[in-house]
Image: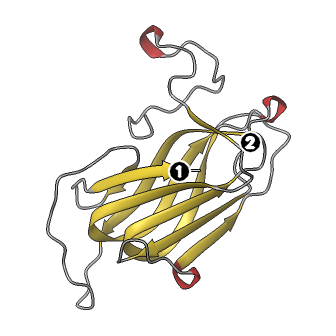
């Protein structure tokens, strides 16, 4: 659902397209642990990342808010993430407008085959309908090329400047 190209309606309880169940376009996580929501991405090839767009709900009167902070790590090796290759983004809380919106995070051309995104809860719930990476293949003599593999999963999406898909992802809290 996070890659179907369909943005969730402002009212997450509204009946969806073609009479789908209410809230179908949204994926929600409840803050039980007080830790961040973590989403891990594995790309077949090393990529250069320009931006990530996260379409997220902000119905704060129902305990649903945009994350307070996003920390995004990049690596060329699985499981080896460090603060030296991380983007730290703080979101200013909005308790005036309850509209869902795209939060755009500049990734400053960071590169990697593996991306770990941590979204820190600002309230009881987080509802996300789309995650889109703006990226392209990374070309460098320093990075060995990776063989193409089949895509494992499609829980996240990216806009690819070279027109090829190569993403798998998993998430945890």
Q: Which residue is mark 2?
A: 65
Residue 141's place in the image compared with 117, above or below, is below
Task: Pick the residue in front: 123 or 17.
Answer: 123
Residue 98: % across, % down = 76, 34
Residue 145's place in the image compared with 93, above or below, is below
Q: Residue at x 66, y 56 (%)?
A: 36
> In the rendered image, which quarter is residue 146 located in?
bottom left
In the image: residue 74, left or right of residue 61: left
**Residue 172 image label:** 1
* Alpha carbon separation for disc pair 2 and 1: 19 Å
Q: Residue at x 31, y 55 (%)?
A: 167
Quarter of the image that includes the N terminus: top left
Label whose residue precedes the other's in the sequence (2 or 1):
2
Residue 91: % across, % down = 73, 58
Disc 2 element: loop
Q: Residue at x 74, y 42 (%)?
A: 65
Q: Residues within 10 Å of mark 2 (few under 14, many from 20)?
A: many
Seen as rendered, the residue at the extreme bottom is 142
Q: Residues within 10 Å of mark 1 (few under 14, many from 20)?
A: few
Disc 1 element: strand
> In the rendered image, which quarter is residue 164 located in?
bottom left
Residue 85: % across, % down = 52, 81
């Amino acid at each position: 659902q996070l890659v179907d190209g369909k943005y969730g309606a402002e009212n997450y309880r509204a009946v969806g397209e073609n009479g789908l169940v209410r809230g179908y376009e949204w994926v929600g996580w409840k803050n039980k642990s007080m830790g961040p929501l973590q989403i891990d991405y594995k790309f077949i090839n090393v990529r250069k990342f320009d931006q990530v767009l996260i379409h997220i709900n902000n119905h704060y009167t129902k305990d649903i808010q945009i994350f307070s902070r996003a920390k995004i790590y990049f690596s060329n090796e699985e499981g080896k993430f460090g603060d030296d290759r991380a983007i730290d983004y703080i979101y200013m809380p909005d308790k005036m407008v309850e509209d869902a919106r795209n939060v755009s995070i500049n990734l400053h051309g960071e590169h990697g085959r593996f991306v770990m995104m941590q979204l820190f809860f600002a309230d009881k719930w987080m509802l996300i309908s789309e995650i889109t990476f703006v990226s392209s293949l990374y070309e460098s003599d320093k990075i060995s090329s990776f063989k193409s593999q089949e895509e494992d999963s499609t829980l996240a999406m990216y806009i690819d400047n070279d027109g090829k898909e190569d993403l798998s992802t998993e998430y945890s809290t």
